[in-house]
């Protein structure tokens, strides 16, 4: 029997009864090897690329925020986030935001405008694993002016941020303040803290005492928030006033849907009667 | 129900004592209602505009 055994590399003819064949595959081993190498390379390349990309992103993230926040030591956040470019995708602070000096206009003037939708700053900070701590700030005027922020976290004004000044003034999109912590002496001042904060509906918590004039007539406060403000009014001062929107009080305390008679309701009158030392005006 | 002294502005008017402004004002104990006088809505709007202007930086 003559058996032709053909190799890719060479051709050899054997004349025998049987053939012990070495490298019987017609190049399959080489092809397998090549294919395996290719697959391994591509997989390794993809994984390596992916890892490299992730590492690269982390390096760039660290480089930016370490510099921007001075490795967590930044204390002056004046105008810090005033820019059209901030969005929920890139606003990921690495360190807690803790101004110990000025925080004026911190998120003022079009902050998050290019985000496309209003920003929940509380949620954004939580997602980044950091906090906004104003407890040691000295001035936060216009901190949220003209920003596209709808919700802010608790503002601690009990220590150094005595004058809340114009903190929420012209924050047209602001709907919710998670809370305001005031000192118990009633020395915080509010000047124009809520001027033109026309969308503000909820102040979800108020700790401490309101002991100076406060005007919330621009705001669209809920009944609960109005009640929180009145409950926080000092019982010890005199000659001071608190102002709400007449429309809002009539609506929120109305005795039946559509009656808009809240300012004469028992509920409202009983509420403000708890603070007889305050002049309450509806504008 | 507890009652407070309340003063109401006429239509088209706003009450003020020079510091506090409002259409309907619940007076604190001891506050004299005669310390308030009326201004027009337009005058009040002007005052508000001036205040907002002063806020502009």
Image (tube, grey):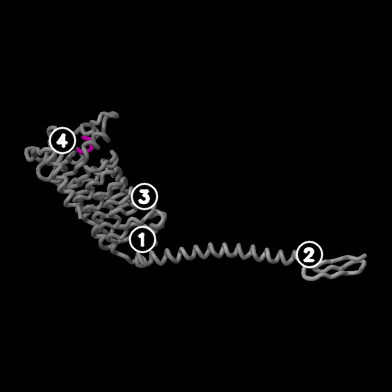
Magenta segment, which residues? A268-272
Q: In the rendered structure, find residue A25 and report the number of the disc placed on it.
A: 2
The chain holding disc 2 is A
- Quadrant of residue A241 within the rendered picture: top left
Q: Nearer the viewer, residue A241 or B11?
A: B11
Q: Is residue B35 left or right of residue A56?
A: left
- At a point 20% along the width and 53% down the height, the residue shown is B56
**Looking at the picture, does residue A218 appear above or below residue A40?**
above
Of the two numbered discs 3 and 2 in the rendering, the one whose residue sits closer to the viewer: 2
The chain holding disc 3 is A
- At a point 28% along the width and 43% down the height, the residue shown is A199
Cβ–Cβ below 8 Å for labels 3 and 2? no
The chain holding disc 1 is A
**Looking at the picture, does residue A83 appear above or below residue A204?**
below
Position in image of residue A265 (x %, y %):
23, 31
- Quadrant of residue A30 within the rendered picture: bottom right
Of the two numbered discs 1 and 4 in the rendering, the one whose residue sits closer to the viewer: 1
The chain holding disc 4 is B
Are the residues flagged by discs 2 and 1 from a single subunit?
A: yes
| Residue at mark 1 to residue at mark 3: CA–CA distance | 17 Å
Dot 2 or dot 1, earlier in sequence: 2
Position in image of residue A172 (x %, y %):
28, 47
């Amino acid at each position: 029997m003559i058996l032709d055994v053909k190799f890719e590399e060479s051709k050899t003819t054997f004349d025998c009864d049987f053939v012990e064949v070495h490298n019987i595959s017609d190049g399959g081993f080489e092809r397998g090897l090549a294919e395996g190498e290719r697959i391994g390379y591509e997989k390794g390349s993809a994984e390596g690329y992916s890892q490299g990309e992730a590492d690269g992103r982390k390096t760039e993230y660290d480089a930016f925020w370490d510099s921007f926040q001075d490795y967590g030591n930044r204390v002056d956040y004046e105008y810090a986030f005033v820019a059209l470019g901030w969005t929920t995708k890139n606003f990921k602070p690495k360190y807690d935001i803790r101004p110990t000096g000025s925080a004026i206009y911190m998120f003022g003037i079009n902050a998050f405008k290019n985000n496309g939708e209003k920003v929940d700053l509380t949620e954004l900070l939580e997602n980044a694993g950091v906090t906004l701590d104003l407890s040691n700030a000295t001035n936060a005027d216009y901190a949220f002016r003209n920003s596209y922020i709808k919700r802010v976290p608790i503002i601690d004004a009990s220590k150094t941020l005595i004058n809340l000044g114009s903190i929420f003034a012209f924050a047209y999109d602001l709907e919710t303040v998670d809370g305001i912590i005031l000192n118990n002496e009633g020395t915080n001042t509010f000047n124009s803290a809520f001027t033109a904060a026309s969308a503000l509906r909820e102040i979800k918590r108020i700790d401490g005492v309101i002991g100076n004039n406060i005007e919330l007539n621009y705001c669209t406060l809920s009944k609960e928030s109005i009640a929180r403000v009145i409950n926080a009014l000092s019982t010890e001062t005199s000659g001071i006033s608190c102002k709400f929107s007449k429309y809002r009080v009539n609506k929120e305390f109305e005795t039946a849907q559509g009656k808009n008679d809240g300012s004469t309701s028992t509920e409202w009158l009983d509420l403000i009667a708890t603070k007889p030392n305050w002049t309450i005006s509806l504008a | 129900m507890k009652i407070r002294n309340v003063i109401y502005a006429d239509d088209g008017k706003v009450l003020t004592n020079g510091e506090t402004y409002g259409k309907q004002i619940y007076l604190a104990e001891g506050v004299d209602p005669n310390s308030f006088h009326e201004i027009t809505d337009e005058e009040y709007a002007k005052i508000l505009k001036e205040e907002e202007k002063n806020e502009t930086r």
